[in-house]
Amino acid sequence: MLEVGGILSWIHEALSSACPEWLTLLIEYVLIGVGFLALYALIALILILLERKICAYYQCRLGPMRAGFWGLLQPLADMFKILMKEIIPLLKNDKFLFFTALFLVIMGSLCTFGALEFSKDLIGIDFNVGVFYVLAVSSLGVLGILLAGWSSNNKYTMIGAMRAGAQLVSYELSSGLSLLAIVILGGTMQLSGLIEAQSETWFLFQSPFTWIAMIIYLIAGHAETNRGPFDLPEAESELTAGYHIEYSGITFGLFYVGEYVNMFTIAGIGTMVFLGGWQPLHIPGADAFNEVMNMIPTWLWFFAKAFALVMLSLWVRWSFPRLRIDQLLHLEWKILMPISLLNMLLMALWVAYF
Amino acid sequence: MEKTLKMIQSVSSSCTKIEAADVMVSVDKKDLHKVCEALYKDGWDYLINLNAIDNVENIEIVYHISKSADMEKFLVLKTNTTDVENPIIETVSDIWKSANLYEREAYDFFGVRFLNHPDMRRLFLRPDWVGYPLRKNYDNTPNEGIPSKVHDMDACEDVPSITLDRHGEIVENHTKLFGRNEYVVNFGPQHPSTHGVLHLRVSLDGEMIKKIDPNFGYIHRGIEKMMESMTYPQMLYLTERFDYLCGSMNRHALCMCVEKAMGIEIPKRAEYIRTIFDELNRIASHLLGWACMCNDMGSITAFIYGMRDREKIMDIFQETAGGRLMVNYYVIGGVAQDIHPNFVNRVKEFIPYLRKMIKEYHTLFTGNPIARGRMINCGFLKKEDAVALGMSGPNGRASGWHCDVRKIAPYAAYSEVDFKEIIHDGGDTIDRYMIRLEEIEESLKIIEQLIDKIPEGDFRAKVPAIVKVPEGEYYQRVENARGDFGVYLKSTGDKSPYRIHFRSPSLVAVSGLDPICKDTKIADLIMIGGSLDYVIPCIDR
Amino acid sequence: MVKYIKDLFSGIYALLQGMVITNRNFWRPKVTEQYPEDRQTARQFERFRGELVFDINDNNEHKCIGCGLCARNCPNQSLEVITKSVTTEDGKTKKVLDKFLYDLGSCTFCSLCTQSCAQKAIKWTNNFEHAVYNRSALVKQLNPEGSKVVERKAAPVAPKQAPATEQNENQQ
């Protein structure tokens, strides 16, 4: 009853009884697009508030308290402020690349966002190589960041972009490898299929190697979102703001939003492949318990798990100092990569013999 | 002392001991370099301070020299030139590296050019500034001498120097600071991690640093010039504006200098209070130094923790003295008012609290493998370099140099307390980092010993209504949170000083950036800058 | 290889320790002061130097005799003491304070004025909310209009009365 899928199929039936098929499809596509953008913006706003509050609490502060009760309206105030700010035109930069970069970053982030299954049967993009799709579109962002750094014609952005390039490309490897380990376990690349495979128990409890894969995925994913301790491309104390120094007003705001939603997307994909996505917590054998768990709507399960992972990421971000570029690459190539390769092998053996 | 005097007199016959003072030697400018070389060979390897004085008929340069192995030794060397129009004196920057910036400062303020000095740019003022402001005949009417045109950065790139050619004629050379194809990045004047308005021009090769050129003067206020027209009580407040993080210690230096010169005996109670305040201030400063360094390394949470605990010290200050950052508590002859009745209790509550917090700091940051990986084996400063650069204070002690003025020349109540001078031998960033946290604990011990023993009595000695320092030259050192802070005072018996000069420990810390950071990465530069813990207003004065 | 694994786990342990510290702080009481809201309860220290004021009694009388010592002691010339000559009832001309101008904008709060004042006519208050829209509003006249100097004779009388009232209270 609380499922969103039901409402959607009701809309579909109502539309198809009133319109020809092509119009139904058109209206539905537009609705889905608008819905995604709205959800995207909403999640960004929630995350911005969450980050500011959580970070403040870790630091013995209160965080925003003025706008609305307990500062709840702060992200809205931020949004309107940033919308009203001037987009400062630069004199000697490549205007075309400068704005293309922005759209690439947002596109990459939005396309990955579309692959999330928010609740049962509520998935935007779902096809048989879903995992590859996610890996492919999430790396669009690197291109955007590199272009942003290059086209700004600024030395700081240039250094930031180069760091981002090195970092994102290398960390994509281990996050991809740890996802592949799960593909071996689940036996499919389709994201919805992977979730179906977890209806009994989550992947996390199906194999000990999922734990290793998950830890590596979370570290690599955290690095891919450019957040501390991996925030070298932005490194506020070194490069002031890294690759987006020259962006102002809403152009900066979009980078900001993209970064925050990426954090959620990474957490969402982690939820889907390790924590069963929208699947409720099931203990094999305990039927009564499973029934109670099934009462909770699936979208709530998904968001609860995803936000739990986001919280973990925030906790890490506000606890550790920043890595240096050589330490960063050392961590990836000498620690995470070998372990995730080994893990994939062990996972394959596990699947073959158990 | 006699031995040293004989030794330098054998080098140059022009050396004469000045009768008024027992450690002051005057030398002819022709023999200066020879004498300095001989002194250096004799172990006088620490140039504490160098400053110039405009005596109208001549320009005098004063060198304060000490031995790094035996810091209690202290020698003042003087030379002068009667050519006031175009004063030229031989450089000693090839003997003592720290003279490099001091001589540039003397050139900036007095127009004294130093022969063979590699870099005779102005230190604080703009390259196109007209005149030399600390000369007595300088016209300081507003807007005179300040060029109105916006000067272009190329002027800073031009490095003039003067040398002698084969015929003994003076030739001016000009070189460029950076090559045409160097990738030079400006760090500052507005940058989150330069701890103020410091401008570093950094030549990069990818992420690696090839050369750093610090550019000062963005917060130069001409305090030394201002003080020449102020009475002694008036100028006290300006001392806290140098190194605003340990303002009371700077103020202590000037107060002591004037008190010693006038022969004022300050009450025991005031001495104890001053010592406790100094140590509290040192803790506050080190906490902020620690916090800022963590912030530079990307751990904003640690920064906030440091600030949170420092706030408690600020409250203690505010309750007793009425000021937080600018404590404004010491006056000539003692302290401005008696301690607040709550003071002792508050300090006693604070000591165990901070001890607990320092344990947390160690777990949160010192033990963190990321932080350790970045700090260990990075940013080496050898002891010899530290001495040559004059880098005293915690930075010097991290390199194994015994240089704590509180031990060498104890002042206030330091001779009555038992404390350890923290010395590390490594000389890398983690030593500089650890030394601050350990010194906080040592300061807590000092406060613990003193807080119950504050003697009863007056908190302020009787001081004449108009403070006049008898004629003569005075030098007073204190150990502030960044090192050896010194006040040089020349008085003609008037109610304001003839010349006053401050030795800034932050200036030498910044001069160490280039040798330390060579072939490290950008991220290391920021971290090392944090570990050196300089404060810009102290440099620029 | 053993060292590699050992380092890995000790590193993870140390990282977790750090996270425990931040978590501990998460639940601690917060130190933020919500300034305009807590205006009534905010920490105030009586010695805090906020703003220079005249010590004025209930009869609108101050103690300043216009000697100008404070203005001479001020390092920034933020004080200006303007005096005028008046003829008293018994025909003597007397120098009295006309205006005492205090430029808060250039004051460094060094306390030299209050220390040098022999009459204890000026003192500090805790008021720290100095923001105004115009710099000229920072120049304040400290002696209120119509105020006058406390009569010299009145001063010794006041302390005598005070213990008397105390005795009365004790008797009651």
Image (cartoon, grey):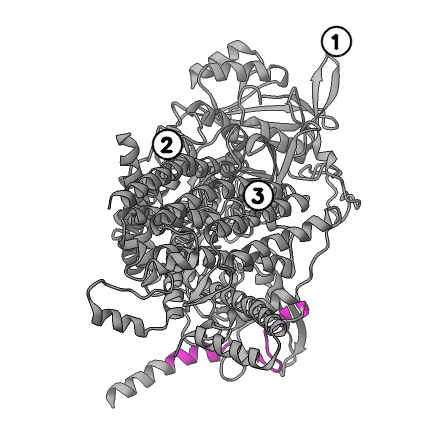
Q: Judge from the rendering whether residue C40 lies leftward or rightward of residue A282; answer left or right.
A: right
How many labels sit on residues? 3
Q: Earlier in the sequence, mark 2 or mark 1?
A: 1
Q: Is residue B367 depicted above or below B325 in this figure? A: above
The span shown in magenta is C135-160
| Nearest-to-viewer mark from 2 and 1 | 1
Q: Amino acid at mark 3?
A: Gly
Seen from this angle, which residue lies furthest right? B149
SS for dot 3: helix
Q: Is residue B490 depicted above or below A3 in this figure? A: above
The span from disc 2 to disc 3 (Cα, nearest Å) is: 47 Å
The span from disc 1 to disc 3 (Cα, nearest Å) is: 53 Å
Query: Label 2 belongs to which residue?
Result: B408
Image-quadrant location for residue A26: bottom right
Residue nearest the observer in this picture, A300 or B483: A300
Relative image position of residue B514 (x, y in whole percent): 54, 30
Query: Label 1 belongs to which residue?
Result: B167
Give me the chain letter of mark 1.
B
Q: Judge from the rendering whether residue B471 lies leftward or rightward of residue A55; answer left or right.
A: right
Q: Amino acid at mark 2?
A: Ile
Q: Is residue B9 depicted above or below A26 in this figure? A: above
Query: Label 3 belongs to which residue?
Result: A160
SS for dot 1: loop
